[in-house]
Amino acid sequence: MSDNSDHASIGSRPSYIATSQSPGVVTVGSSIPVSTSSAAATMTAPKPSELGTTGIEQEQFRLLDLPLELVVRIIGYAVVTSTEERPLDVNPSSAVQPAITRACRLLRAEGLKLFYACNCFSITATSSRTAMFWRWRAAIGQAKAAKIKRLFVQLVASNGYPLDLGRVQWHWWLTEVEFHNRYVAKENLPAVIYVRMMDDRVVMFPTDNTSIESGRYEISFTDRSNEGECWRNLDDFPPSPHPYNTMYDRAKAESKDWWTRPS
């Protein structure tokens, strides 16, 4: 992506300047010696009308002169750079708005719409990355955040490596929920956060790591209250249980049957 003019650059035409050599010989450009004594080899400069469409006077291409449908399609190629398998990692360099969206109002309006709606985003659940993500979320605002269709959270252990889901208990997930809610309160965000569910379990999407049963869950800033049991508001999860609480259910807290793979 580039921040330059939307005119296509035109390559310079090769020089036809003749440089002096031995008597009776000139060099065309910088290579072929031509005898000046032969009438057939006489060099004449081309007339402007003979330059054709590839010459110096070629008309410059203007993106905004195209029909809007084609403009939007071209913008899409520039701003949609991720897939579910290869999401756009949210960090200070990769999550910034594409440069093309700063060219003019049309490219900004259409480009940002596609950037948030069609890209898949991912954050790594370390303390530093999570803090950075919530600052980014506060900066873009609710309107843009609500346009994000796919946003994944990659689970990691305290050492930063992927977390083995086979060892993760229910009380850990409730702590993860509280972690997000604290950041929402800290950044003073009027945000609702939904997590994708299936059969009353958190959906954990697989990752490239095949050595352990790692995973990532999906969240959304869009109101999903009308989508049945496929999504659950993080506020609807119970608080993290405390062992000293008289209502503490140890069997439930240590349960590992709280997540599932997508169908």
Image (cartoon, helix red, strand yellow):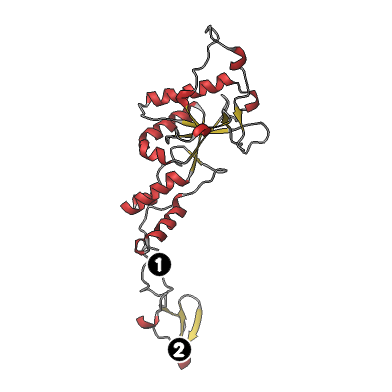
Closest to the observer: 161 or 240? 240
Q: Is residue 23 above or below residue 178?
A: below
Horizontally, residue 37 falls left or right of residue 106, namely right
> Three-letter amino acid code at disc 1?
Ile
Residue visible at 44% across and 57% down in the picture? 73
* Front in this rendered view, residue 81 or 19: 81
The front one of 262 and 132 is 262
Residue found at the far right of this picture: 211
Q: Amino acid at mark 2?
A: Thr
Q: Residue farthest to the left? A: 105
Q: Residues within 10 Å of mark 2 (few under 14, many from 20)?
A: some
Q: Position of residue 215 (x, y in %)?
A: 59, 33
Find disc 2 in the rendering and name its residue.
Answer: 36
Residue at image position (47%, 46%) is: 118
Q: Secondary structure at mark 2?
A: loop
Calculate the distance from the C-alpha at mark 2 to the C-alpha at mark 1: 33 Å
Sequence-first disc among 2 and 1? 1
Q: Position of residue 8 (x, y in %)?
A: 40, 63
Q: Nearer the viewer, mark 2 or mark 1?
A: 1
Label 1 belongs to which residue? 10
Q: Secondary structure at mark 1?
A: loop
Q: Residues within 10 Å of mark 1 (few under 14, many from 20)?
A: some
Q: Vertically, is 29 above or below 117?
A: below
Q: Give the percent coordinates (x, y) of residue 28.
A: 46, 79
